[in-house]
Amino acid sequence: MAECQAQNKAKLISETRRRFEAEYVTDKPDKYDPRDVERLQQDDNWVESYLCWRHDVVDETLKMIDESFQWRKEMAVNDLTEASIPKWLLEIGGIYLHGYDKEGNKLLWIRVKYHVKDHKTILDKKKLIAFWLERYAKRENGKPITVMFDLSETGINSIDMDFVRFIINCFKVYYPKYLSKIVIFDMPWIMNAAFKIVKSWLGPEAVSLLKFTNKHEVQDYVSVEYLPSHMGGTDPFKYSYPPLVDDDFQTPLCENGPIASEDEASSKEDTESDGKDTLETIFGEEQTALLKKINLTDSTSKTEENEKVDSKTKAFKKPLSVFKGPLLHISPAEELYFGSSESGEKKTLIVLTNVTKNIVAFKVRTTAPEKYRVKPSNSSCDPGATIDIVVSPHGGFPVSAQDRFLIMAAEMEQTSGTGPAELAQFWKEVPRNKVMEHRLRCHIVESSKPTSLTLKDGAFNMSDKTSEDMCLQLNRLLESNRKLEDQVQRCIWFQQLLLSLTVLLLAFVISFFYLLYS
């Protein structure tokens, strides 16, 4: 039965291609982008998506492809890039991809409050929608997407039926079979009439894909970890640009390019080179301000020869800030600190701790894979164990504050293997809603060799309690310095006031004597 269906589907795909070429392309070859015509002849999934949306009726499918391809050429969809979109539209955060629904479908967020009806900007906004959908389509090739219409804090100026109709047409004609559902959150009563019109545009079959929700009902479709706080969620994500959010993280890190899995040769090379370096690192954002004020020198004795093998990770200052996720605790919580390029980029450390009772697989992505080496970038962590991930700049590329890192983690079955082949297969099969994600920004420290903080190889062979005590002392010293600065400011202000009063008094005396003897 299944084989028969596959044969019928293959015949329909073949007929669609033949007839489109003969009936539409031959007479007007300039009507479409040649890249779309070529892809139609090669990509079975693309042809099948149009057929499926038109219930395998070839005549209707051909009309749909014709309309879609004309639109794609008109909008220059194949050539849309970030440079095609006004920067202010990317910065405002009105439209972007982020997170997944409970079925594992990607979320396309449309924050309606950022949209103001304006015929001068509507074309650019349509291009932004097309940019994200095309970007996603090329990446996922047919996987459904869920549209999140966030209508919270929306006013009458944001109602733009032309824009809404364009979004609906994108899924009805231009990107068939991609729409999973449209989740409409917190719709104001003033828009009830408008969405009755929207339902007529969708048609009876697609109307069932509309999900009207409030703060409690939205959690039926999206778990709290991917919902912002105003929707009752716990997602700490805050939109920022650049870089493009979420789907701009490159993968995999461990198979191509400069970021490779650690082999014996590179391990030996790094161990030898790292043993010669004196590493200056930073505790975290709380201690950055102290770097120019406090001078610490290490007086600890040299470690034993066999301990030098582990100097690769012991040389790093363990970050103090911690993100406490359901699978992993990740340190630092928000930012990776790198030295400035004046004296050479310094390596930094990401510490993962498995807080579950199962093995947790993890992998690291970055927005700039050509810049960094990450070791390990794709591995697993045993229950209760801690893994140190070394991140180092590579190839002379400068660290940028725009660079981001993404840590992905998921629980594995006890019987699963943890070799490269097993991990690769695991990541192909694990549902998206089972994957924990956490993002880290890059922070560049102005001086990678601060005169105020010198850390040597054995500087951090101390207990966690000692480290915490030192942190408390540093914070107290910072508070004392702040109070002292306040007192100095008050003294300066008082001196200025006293000087002003003295000048006024002197002027008064001079004026008095001048009037007395004149």
Image (cartoon, rainbow, N blue to C red):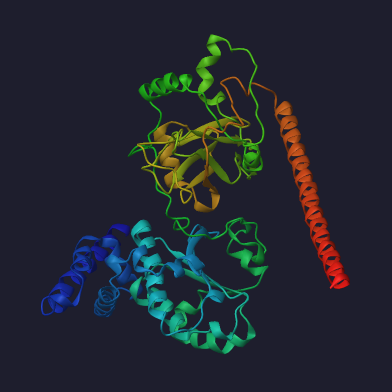
Residue farthest front in this picture: 517
Q: Residue at x 47, y 42 (%)?
A: 364
Residue 230 on image: x %, y %: 66, 66
- Is 24 left, or right, of 339 in this rendering? left
Between 276 and 255, the one lying in front of the other is 276
Residue 491 on image: x %, y %: 80, 50
Residue 123 on image: x %, y %: 38, 79
Residue 337 on image: x %, y %: 54, 40
- Is 261 left, or right, of 150 in this rendering? left
Q: Quadrant of the N terminus?
A: bottom left
Q: Is the residue 319 above or below the residue 25 in the image?
A: above
**Occupied quadrant, residue 63:** bottom left
- Is 500 left, or right, of 187 in this rendering? right
- Is 53 left, or right, of 197 in this rendering? left
Between 493 and 304, the one lying in front of the other is 493
Q: Is the residue 147 above or below the residue 381 in the image?
A: below
Res. 287 visible in picture:
yes
Q: Residue at x 41, y 33 (%)?
A: 420
